[in-house]
Image (tube, helix red, strand yellow):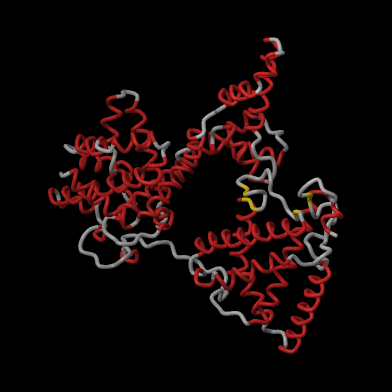
Amino acid sequence: MNRRSIKKRAFKDLKRQYFKAVLVCFLFTIVFGNGYTFVTKIFPNETPREVVATVEENKDTLKNKSKEEIKLDIKSNIEEREKAKKEKYTRGVLAVFANQVSSSGSLMIGILKAFNQLLFKGNVSLFFILLLGFNLNVLALIFVKNIIAVGRCRFFLESTKYRKVRLDKVLFIYRVKKTLTTAKSMLLTSIYQFLWNLTIIGGIIKHYSYLLVPYIIAENPTISGKDAIELSRKMMNGRKLEAFKLELSLLPWYLLGVATFQFSDLLFLNPYHQAILAEFYMNVRNECLEEDSSLAIYLNDRYLDGNIKNSYYPMDKFTIPEKEHRTWLNFDYKKNYSVVNLVLFFFTFAMIGWLWEVALHLFETGNFVNRGTLIGPWLPIYGYGGILILVLLKPFRDKPYILFILTCLLCGIVEYGTSWYLEVKYHLRWWDYTGYFLNLNGRVCLEGLFVFGLGGCGFTYLVAPFLDNLYNKIKPSIKYLIAITLLSLFVVDNIYCHNKPNIGEGITTYKSDCNLESKIL
């Protein structure tokens, strides 16, 4: 077995699927490998340095204080900074989750504590949360993490042969309906590995004995756990040292990961390692089939190897048929919309946005407030955003996940630009996301963009096709009359509010301490 040849092929595989491979490994690391904590490694606790800086900046003031007063000042400084770090984000639902996950050091426990705070005002005991968190972690390990790990193996196995691999291969086991079988097999492997780990040396040896189990399952999800383990042991017989040397050859990359605070791991090493293991499996698999053809009963996916010309793996020829996708709604979301219907869409979206903002403020404060810069019951930013999504993002309607991402980006640009314009022109803010998780200058935030992304997809696939069918039933003369009337009222509203926009408590916030009337008049 040639290690250099395996690594060379793995590098070529990774080049073909680089961005997808990085995304697969990144999501797996972040969600299941506590990768969210790597930020704290990049930016460790700086309290001692900050306190020293504070002392250095105030030397003259400290000269006139006693040692006890200085100690109290430093202690107070540390407490204030620690409190600020624990409550870095102060507004929004995501802020609660971000703060709780950050302070808990555990994704699952942090999420449960956040739900406890949001739904039960923190009244559920910590013991119950920890107990529930432990049980959920175990279930997630068995029925999610291990299943996705096998799906990740499937993704990289197909990458060894095919020019293109779909991201949804990570859900491969769910789609062929072998979740329970795979969960049992992976759990049995984990139990065996845990028991052998108690012997230390035995744990290292068995790690390589069981190394191929998830790849065997990824090729043949019907195999039992015992058979997969036994087959892996047989295939790795005489090859464990080679696998160890192969992984040891990546040591320089691991050292680079330490030097770059794991950024090189995320961008290269993790997907490269997975590509190497996939190539290693295919190499061992082919050698074992040549040595013992009877293994073909287990290693039965003949389309994983051979001279295949297709870009994608032919899933219709797989030994187990995938779960058929059920069509729930029969809307033609690819259709073109007439100009008059787009005008009606604009006002529909703008009014829905107005109702959403008013209802949200009413729910939070108990007060009815006419939100927006205009007098009428519409928020133009929602209307413009909806139309731009339907028109500019039409080529991406067949790819929902790309449409979602682009919708978030487009709405972010529109919202940020509108906020900037209104603030420059009127020196006021009609919304402010300061204190929200991942906000940009208080103009946009992750939570808002996520809602806009979901709303945009809902408009594209459900609301717009439904409304188009509904509006097409209206007589053309009446439809044009409605559109012209709404446009006329909208223009009048804009002219009237150009110099005197809708302002007041719950509508706008001060940009500065200057007098409000002097800013508007």
Q: Is residue 365 above or below residue 405?
A: above
Percent coordinates x, y for residue 252 in the rendering: 29, 36
Q: Can residue 423 be seen in this view?
A: yes
Q: Residue 47 at what x, y percent from top left? A: 58, 25
Question: As rendered, which of 350 and 327 lies closer to the eye?
Answer: 350
Spot the residue most to the left.
291
| Quadrant into which the C terminus falls | bottom right
* Left or right for 463, reference 137: right
Query: In the shown orientation, is residue 123 left or right of residue 36?
Result: right
Question: Is 79 placed above or below 114 here?
Answer: above
388 or 424: nearer the eye? 424
Question: Which residue is at the front of the view, 156 or 36?
Answer: 36
The structure residue drawn at horizontal position 76% and vertical position 86%, both measured from the top left corner, is 478
Please identify the quarter of the rendering in which residue 102 is found.
top right
Q: In which quarter of the image is residue 518?
A: bottom right
Residue at position x 25%, y 35% in the image:
248
Q: Is residue 318 above or below residue 202?
A: below
Quadrant in the picture for the N terminus:
top left
Rendered residue at 31%/49% (across/down): 223
Question: Where residue 195 appears, x then y in whole percent?
Answer: 35, 28
